[in-house]
Amino acid sequence: MSLTDLAATIAARKGADPDTSWTARLLSNPDKAAEKFGEESVEAIIEAVRNDRERLTAEAADALYHLLVMCAARGVTLSDIEAELASRQKQSGIEEKANR
C-alpha cells in the first residue's frame, strides 16, 4: 500500500461509525489522534535505538498511519504535506533550517 492509498483510505473513513472504525474514532477526536501519533513515534524511536529492523519497520508503519490520521483530523492532507516538501527542494536543508 502506498502513502497515497493509505491517505485515501483514511479520508474515506471520515464518515464511518467511530464505534466500528478505529480510524473514524481517531478522526473524531483530534487530540487522541495526536496522542496516538506520539506514542507510535516513541515506539519507533525505541526500536531504532535497539537496532531491531523488523520491529522498527512495523512501528514506522504504525507511526506513518497515525501521522496521516492526526493530520487528516486537523484538515491537513497528504497533498498539503507533499507540496510543503516540494517547496523545500529549492534550498538545502541547512539553508531551510536557518530560515526558520
Image: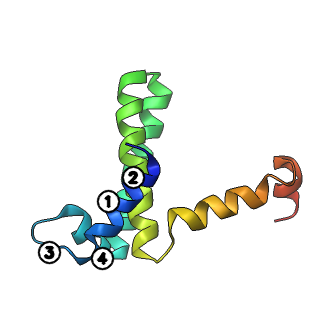
Residue 76 picture location, percent across and down: 51, 72
Image vertical order of residue 43 relative to residue 48, above or below: below
Q: Residue 9 bears which disc, if any?
A: 1
What amino acid is labelled 2 in the image? Asp
What amino acid is labelled 1 in the image? Thr
Q: Quadrant of residue 74?
A: bottom left
Q: Crowding near pointer 4: few (<14 within 10 Å), some, many (20+)?
A: some
Image vertical order of residue 65 relative to residue 45, above or below: below
Q: Earlier in the sequence, mark 3 or mark 4?
A: 3
The residue labelled by disc 3 is 17
Residue 53 picture location, percent across and down: 43, 22
* Inter-mark Cα distance, 3 to 2: 21 Å
Describe the element under mark 2 as helix, strand or loop.
helix
Residue 16 picture location, percent across and down: 19, 73
* Inter-mark Cα distance, 4 to 2: 22 Å
In the rendered view, does 45 fall on the left or right side of 84? left
Q: Are marks 2 and 1 in contact (CB under 8 Å)?
A: yes
* Inter-mark Cα distance, 3 to 1: 14 Å
Q: Residue 29 bears which disc, if any?
A: 4
Q: Earlier in the sequence, mark 4 or mark 1?
A: 1
